Image (cartoon, grey):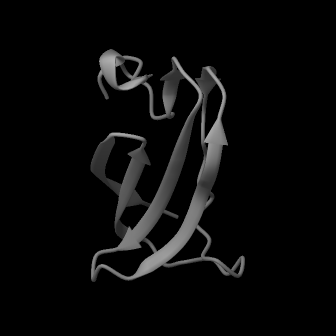
């Protein structure tokens, strides 16, 4: 994330980071096949520091299997994507 975009990632942090201005933020988790697993955040966040956790569940609260998953963070003017490994 870049500060000028309104969100700044903290070094060594897995959280959303700092939101410097009020903005719409959506965080989505996808399977390795590109299927949407769940949406962790979908709405306006005020300026502040946020940590968003995913507990390895889908939209319905069912536990998903271990494996590679992707996250996508969309803010007003930026899209950040990353990969993560879920181990149980």
- Along the line of sight, the residue nearer the viewer: 43 or 16: 43
Residue at image coords 37%, 55%: 72
Q: How many numbered discs sit on the rendered protein?
A: 0
Specify the quadrant of the image occupied by residue 85.
Answer: bottom left
Residue 45, located in which quarter of the rendered image? top right
**Left or right relative to 85: residue 58:** right
Query: Which image quadrant is residue 54 in?
Result: bottom right
Q: Is residue 74 above or below residue 35?
A: above
Residue 56 in percent (x, y) is at 57, 65
Give the vertical position of 35 relative to 80 (above or below).
below
> Whole-percent x and y of residue 2?
29, 22
Image side of residue 12 versus residue 43, left or right: left
The x and y percentages for residue 17 are 49, 25
- 69 sits left or right of 88 in the view: left
Front position in the image: 57 or 72: 72
x and y, in percent, of residue 3 in the image: 35, 16
Q: Is the residue 9 above or below the residue 86 in the image?
A: above
Residue drawn 51% across and 53% down? Answer: 26
Name the residue furthest right.
61
Q: As displayed, is residue 64 above or below residue 73?
A: below
Residue at image point 41% right, 18% down: 10
The structure residue drawn at horizontal position 67% and vertical position 81%, both measured from the top left corner, is 62
Query: In which quadrant will I find the N terminus?
Result: top left
Q: Nearer the viewer, residue 14 or 77?
A: 77
């Amino acid at each position: 994330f870049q500060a000028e975009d309104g969100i700044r990632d903290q070094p060594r942090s897995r959280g959303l980071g700092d939101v410097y201005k009020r903005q719409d933020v959506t965080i989505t988790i996808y399977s390795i096949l590109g299927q949407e697993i769940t949406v962790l955040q979908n709405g306006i966040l005020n300026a502040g520091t946020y940590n968003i956790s995913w507990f390895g569940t889908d939209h319905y609260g069912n536990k998903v299997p271990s494996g590679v998953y992707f996250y996508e963070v969309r803010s007003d003017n930026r899209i950040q994507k990353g990969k993560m490994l879920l181990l149980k």
